[in-house]
Amino acid sequence: ILLCGDPGVAKSQLLKHITKIAPRAVYTTGKGSSGVGLTAAVIRDPSTGDVTLEGGALVLADKGICCIDEFDKMDEYDQTAIHEVMEQQTVSVAKGGITTTLNARTSILAAANPLLGRYDTKKSAEQNINLPTALLSRFDMTYLLLDSA
């Protein structure tokens, strides 16, 4: 689900509240998360030299909800990391000698602001939201939250 709308209509508050009431939920921001932080990272232990795999927000939210705020502020590279999760419900990893597939059977609830600050009702959703069409099409539902005052 994608929530898009004017700033100040409590999209972020809604996402934070859902993480409190859902049995399994992870909250992150698009601006502060990298593709690795959303999917998985290979970490080398400095003392032993062993490599381990750490799941990112989408893997940690397996069978739950991953709330991503400021989805429109993500780098294009980081947005492409989400494609596989939204389509296949998995994260494929081939790093540091580790090749595996992790489950990421999560529902994504994302919030985004319009491209020019306020939603222009004369334009389509694709023209208002600063996201590639391929990524927008992976959302089952898009809700507009508009400030009409």
Image (spheres, rainbow, N blue to C red):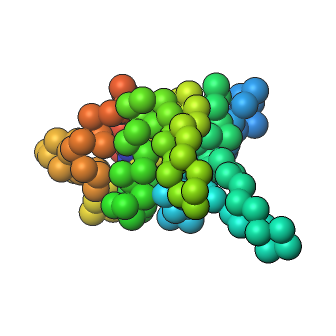
The quarter of the displayed image where residue 103 is located: top right
Quadrant into which the N terminus falls: top left
Whether residue 13 can be seen here: no
Residue found at the very far left of the displayed protein: 122
Q: Residue at x 21, y 44 (%)?
A: 133
> Relative to 56, is 25 above or below?
above
Whole-percent x and y of residue 10? Answer: 55, 47
Decide which of 16, 9 is in the foreground and name it.
16
The quarter of the displayed image where residue 76 is located: bottom left
87 displayed left or right of 56: left
Q: Residue at x 75, y 37 (%)?
A: 20
Q: Residue at x 68, y 40 (%)?
A: 60
> Relative to 104, is 125 above or below?
below
The quarter of the displayed image where residue 144 is located: top left
Residue found at the very far right of the displayed protein: 47
Whole-percent x and y of residue 95? Answer: 53, 57
Decide which of 43, 25 is in the foreground and name it.
43
Decide which of 26, 116 is in the foreground and name it.
26
Total labels drawn: 0
Whole-percent x and y of residue 106? Answer: 56, 30
> Relative to 92, is 78 above or below?
below
Q: Residue at x 46, y 37 (%)?
A: 85
Whether residue 132 can be seen here: yes
> Relative to 53, is 31 above or below?
below
Residue found at the very far bottom of the displayed protein: 46
19 displayed left or right of 68: right
Whole-percent x and y of residue 35? Answer: 49, 57
